[in-house]
Amino acid sequence: MFPNSILGRPPFAPDHQQHNNFFTLSPALYSHQQLIDAQFNFQNADLSRAVSLQQLTYGNVSPIQTSASPLFRGRKRLSDEKNLPLDSKRQRFHSPHQEPTLINQIVPLSSERRYSMPPLFQTHYVPDVVRCAPPFREIPFLEPREITLPEAKDKVNQKTEARHILTLVHKHFCTRLSGYIERPQLIRAKVPIVKFRDKVSCVEFDLNVNNIVGIRNTFLLRTYAYLENRVRPLVLVIKKWASHHQINDASRGTLNSYSLVLMVLHYLQTLPEPILPSLQKIYPESFSPAIQLHLVHQAPCNVPPYLSNNESNLGELLLGFLKYYATEFDWNSQMISVREAKAIPRPDGIEWRNKYICVEEPFDGTNTARAVHEKQKFDMIKDQFIKSWHRLKNKRDLNSILPLRTAILKR
């Protein structure tokens, strides 16, 4: 969930990217793309393909606007595919010293079809898809009777109506679409979702019903992801680390991916030389909860690139992340707030009382880590931060906390 894109194209032209050493912690981690210069002796497998896991597609442009800067005016994206429309090109970025590297693929064109979809029926009906959806008008749809689901109102009771709708969706995935979708799972959380995976692309999805906050925070996180080149690979590795150590599963009482992402952003905001600012404080007009939903996707276009003076490489940031939550952050009295770009005192409200981990949702102020409600699970999470920090600090080897072959095989 980096929230799970056109997260593929960076906001910086190839010759004018931010200073970035990428993952110097492990030369083998991205050895296939040769993105790293070794500082620590990390060996083992190639995790290069894992970079493209973050695929939520919302359009063909970066959320960061760079056209205003003379450095970027007139620059074109590089592509090895000639004579194709702009939206069919693969999205690339450059390391300052290396060849271009494929990161993500944009929304498929109509000529490509979606091979993961069932056979298409002959129909002239095309739904009127608007607002935050990608440009699907050119993509053929099933007959309406084949995909009819209850029509949701603007406000949906997540405990009753949303669960009922997702139950029907889950049943459909398990029967009619079982040849195209795998691992469908209905999760009856506070905001219920259906998790599933496309068999062809292997992309994993979380489907909810009218979770408006989810739309807003998706574009907020997307903007953070492109504000600084080190954010995405750092989040990726930390999510892999948490999953490997079984502390990244809200259904089992540990941290969900959204909370982990917020924890990473919070850490990057609180460094002596911050790598990220608070977008909501600097650009309140672009990330206000009052912005109409159909305008949410336009707001990030007003945010220019952020250049940090912090030159730490990704290996140092990973080690610092583990140390921060192992020794510095006060779990008992503090709350993580990306909105404020700092740790703030815990509120006295009932939602925060007797909670082991408090992570503020940037828009509605709820606790995103409320799933951690058992002391045993909380102790397990804290213990893993401490153990991993000591191990990585002593061995300087990423394999000591995240066996790379295991991480790849779990995909």
Image: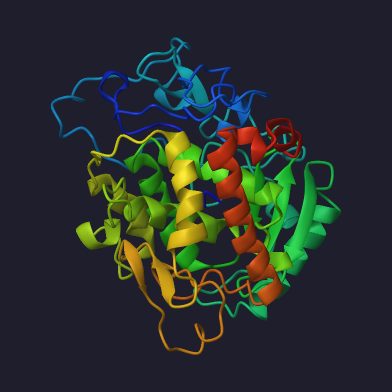
Q: Position of residue 232 (x, y in %)?
A: 46, 40
Identify the residue shown where x is 59% and y is 66%.
209
Q: Residue at x 48, y 12 (%)?
A: 81
Picture coordinates of residue 144, whole percent (x, y):
68, 54
Count of numbered circles on the image: 0
Location of the C terminus by quadrant is top right
Place residue 12 in its image quadrant: top left
The image shows residue 69 at horizontal and vertical percentages of 15, 31
Q: Residue at x 43, y 59 (%)?
A: 217
In this rendering, would 50 be left or right of 345?
Answer: right
Q: Residue at x 32, y 42 (%)?
A: 227
Residue 285 vs residue 81, the one in the foreground: 285
Image position of 118 (left or right of 113): right
User: What's the image's color scheme?
Assistant: rainbow
Relative side of 376 to 10, left or right: right
Kindly tell me whether residue 129 is visible in this rendering: no
Q: Is residue 238 among what the camera can see?
A: yes
Instruction: Say if 344 sits above or below 245 in the image.
Output: below
Q: Nearer the viewer, residue 211 or 171?
A: 211
- Residue at the far right in the pictured view: 175
Q: Position of residue 136 (x, y in %)?
A: 52, 42
